């Protein structure tokens, strides 16, 4: 698998460095001083000179006819590796090898034209030898090889475009991950046969934004693909001198005669990138202390693997006098590969790129709030370009799936929902697994991303008004029953609250139970406010929506907190006590709850009516206002009966009111039933029950007997 490509452009040959020289045209040694040729050219029929062979032994050559010789430019690709290779090997299941790709030869020779002339050569650059004149062979009296074939060439612009728009790179070497070791200037094991047939080798794949990192606020796995939302793109800092330029010792010019040039130590490289979030500046520092000579710095390729890059600023210090310089190189987007580059024509001078000063603020983060990144199937490391989608113009807060049809005849067409700050969007899955269309289905905005929860064929989420769910294409509120003014139990039903006051004679278990009951009674946060900061999970086994408070960071890890529960089957709400929750995970079919003490609970058990556990669990039921007639005629409760599957006798409190504001205590009883109760007449009633049940026990209802009191004439 190719995770991504990392093209680093390194020319192995400088233009005009082909050396095909005449063996019969020579200069006297005294007539050649550096680049300067004076005197006349000697024309000889017989020429003798020697050169070392492959074993570095002298090899004598005698030429008696008109002849030309080619001075081969043998180039070895060397590599250096630094860093902790053991850490790299930890990824051996993903990374197989490090591969090296090259292009076919790219020359400036015009093969359609004819060679018509010779010319006295000018010393040129070559990797490994700097600026050279070693193409000539010298004897005691003369130099051979100073006159060379003048190859016809294409224009500099055409050649520049050929280099800049090259997109075909072919594999010639592979370094196995297990064999990688830290090294310095080791020859790459290049397959020579592959060099001869380079265009038949495996071609490099150039992926989209390969070097940038993705930071996501959330993820969702669907259809064997990883979906990322709330994405921030961290831009690649850029290649440093070690990577972008060949090894510096191979770029030094010949220091003899008139070829001495200035050398620069690169301190840092700043790349300017135009993004959707504005202009960004990324910085890579260079502390190697190595230098590059002026000619190569001006003409070698400066490359950044992102076509949005527009400029590269190089901060350098001139070695000869320690004067700092700032150089600015314009970057041009490549036509065929994802990147921008600056490439000289090997005729440019470094003085052309000097910039006085340049101020910037480093910023390498690009917000992609409305982008949805989808990976390849079963490969969470690669996000292809055609799987990046834009959802609205807001920020994606979360995604969830539903399999219910949005309209008749469209079952499963839009199985994924994206919740954004500008509404809810439905995503249509194409045959390739990516999303082919994105359509808005509601302008409701989720106010708590932690509440987005997949239910059975619907999705729950919290808005500023309610906890709702998407059913087909409709938004249905589940909390209308919780709307209304807050009812203070402690202030209005004082006898109930006083029942759970701690007494000195209470045992430890009773104290804990009363403490939990008081916590439920004194819970005063409005439900809609609670939903804004809770974590919602779905108990698939019992069809319950659990709303857990994960904001109690200052409380002890073992402290109790209040949570909400909604029964999807019964469409009823309740509160319950749970340990201090750190977080919760919706993982079908078993969600998990992690407490702040580190323990984890898995909700993998359905309700068991035959559970032999005899542990009793206490609870309180407080009714809403009860009114038995449509008019304002008062009534009196004369009897009741509890329906349970156990012999437990609940404690019941009875309250009455004539204005639904001021409540009067009517009495308390723990009898299982009564058919005669002496009570006053009221227009409104409330009852409260305290029960303690085992897991197998059930409470069904309390039935009341009511008599109507008539007013006097």
Image (cartoon, grey):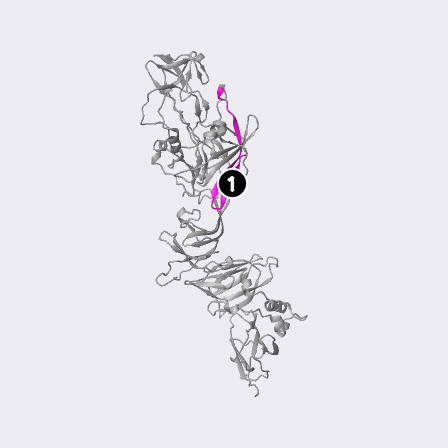
> Is 373 located above or below residue 607 in the figure?
above
Q: Where is residue 617 in the image (x, y as percent from the top left)?
A: 56, 69
Q: Quadrant of residue 322?
A: top right
Which residue of the protein is positioned furthest toward the bottom in this rendering? 713
Q: Badge 1, how many Cα within 10 Å: few under 14, some, many 20+?
A: many
**Residue 632 shows in the view:** yes
Label 1, on which residue?
281
Front residue of 164 and 80: 164
Q: Quadrant of the C terminus?
A: bottom right
> Would you say 620 lies left or right of 108 here?
right
Q: Where is residue 374 in the image (x, y as percent from the top left)?
A: 42, 50
**SS type, badge 1:** strand
Q: Quadrant of residue 471?
A: bottom left
> Would you say 520 lies left or right of 280 here?
right
Tell me which residue sits at (37%, 58%) in the image: 413
Give the residues in magenta.
258-286
> Would you say 68 lies left or right of 587 here?
left
């Amino acid at each position: 698998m190719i995770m991504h490509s990392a093209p680093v452009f390194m020319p192995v040959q400088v233009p005009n460095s082909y050396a095909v020289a005449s063996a019969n045209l020579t200069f006297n040694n005294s007539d050649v001083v550096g680049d300067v040729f004076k005197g006349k050219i000697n024309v000889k029929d017989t020429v003798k000179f020697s050169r070392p062979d492959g074993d570095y032994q002298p090899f004598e050559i005698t030429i008696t006819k008109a002849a030309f010789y080619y001075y081969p430019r043998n180039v070895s690709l060397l590599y250096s590796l630094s860093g902790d290779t053991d850490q790299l090997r930890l990824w051996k299941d993903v990374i197989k090898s490090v591969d090296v790709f090259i292009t076919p030869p790219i020359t400036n020779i015009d093969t359609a034209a004819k060679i018509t002339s010779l010319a006295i050569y000018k010393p040129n650059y070559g990797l490994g030898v700097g600026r050279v004149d070693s193409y000539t062979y010298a004897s005691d009296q003369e130099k051979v090889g100073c006159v060379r074939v003048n190859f016809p060439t294409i224009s500099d612009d055409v050649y520049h475009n050929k280099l800049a728009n090259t997109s075909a790179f072919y594999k010639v070497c592979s370094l196995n991950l297990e064999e990688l070791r830290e090294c310095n200037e080791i020859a790459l094991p290049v397959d020579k046969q592959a060099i001869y047939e380079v265009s038949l080798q495996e071609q490099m794949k150039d992926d989209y934004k390969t070097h940038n990192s993705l930071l996501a606020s959330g993820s969702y796995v669907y259809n064997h693909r990883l979906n990322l939302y709330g994405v921030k793109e961290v831009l690649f800092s850029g290649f440093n001198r070690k990577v972008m330029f060949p090894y510096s010792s191979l770029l030094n010019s010949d220091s003899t005669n008139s070829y001495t040039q200035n050398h620069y130590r690169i301190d840092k490289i700043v790349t300017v990138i135009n993004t959707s979030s504005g202009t960004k500046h990324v910085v890579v520092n260079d502390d190697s202390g190595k230098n590059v000579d002026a000619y190569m710095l001006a003409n070698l390729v400066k490359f950044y693997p992102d076509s949005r890059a527009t400029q590269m600023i190089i901060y350098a210090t001139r070695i000869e006098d320690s004067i700092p310089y700032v150089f600015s190189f314009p970057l041009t987007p490549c036509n065929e590969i994802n990147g921008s580059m600056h490439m000289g024509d090997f005729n440019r001078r470094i003085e052309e790129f000097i910039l006085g000063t340049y101020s910037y603020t480093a910023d390498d983060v690009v917000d992609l709030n409305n982008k949805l990144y989808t990976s390849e199937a079963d490969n969470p490391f690669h996000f292809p370009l055609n799987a990046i989608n834009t959802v609205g113009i807001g920020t994606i807060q979360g995604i969830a799936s539903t399999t219910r049809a949005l309209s008749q005849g469209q079952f499963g067409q839009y199985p994924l929902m994206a919740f954004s700050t500008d509404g809810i969007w439905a995503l249509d899955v194409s045959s390739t697994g990516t999303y082919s269309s994105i359509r808005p289905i509601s302008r409701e905005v989720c106010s708590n991303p932690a509440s987005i929860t997949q239910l059975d064929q619907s999705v729950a989420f919290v808005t500023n008004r309610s906890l709702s769910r998407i059913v087909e294409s409709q938004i249905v509120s589940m909390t209308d029953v919780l709307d209304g003014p807050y009812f203070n139990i402690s202030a209005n039903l004082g006898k109930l609250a006083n029942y759970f006051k701690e007494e000195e004679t209470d045992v430890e278990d009773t104290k804990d139970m009363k403490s939990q009951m008081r916590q439920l009674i004194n819970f005063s946060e409005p439900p809609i406010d609670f939903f804004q900061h809770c974590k919602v999970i779905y108990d698939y086994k019992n069809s319950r929506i659990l709303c857990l408070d994960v904001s109690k960071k200052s409380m002890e890890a073992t402290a109790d907190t209040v949570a909400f529960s909604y029964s999807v089957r019964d469409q009823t709400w309740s509160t319950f006590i749970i340990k201090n929750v750190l977080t919760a995970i919706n993982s079908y079919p078993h969600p998990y709850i992690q407490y702040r003490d580190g323990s984890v609970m898995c909700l993998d058990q359905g309700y068991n009516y035959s559970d032999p556990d005899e542990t009793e669990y206490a609870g309180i039921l407080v009714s809403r206002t009860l009114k038995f007639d449509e008019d304002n005629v008062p009534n009196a409760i004369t009897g009741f009966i509890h329906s349970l599957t156990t012999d437990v006798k609940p404690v019941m409190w009875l309250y009455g009111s004539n204005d639904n504001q001021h409540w009067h205590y009517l009495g308390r009883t723990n009898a299982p039933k009564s058919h005669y109760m002496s009570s006053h007449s009221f227009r409104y009633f409330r009852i409260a029950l305290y029960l303690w049940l085992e897991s197998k026990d059930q409470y069904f209802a309390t039935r009341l007997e009511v008599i109507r009191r008539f007013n006097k004439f």
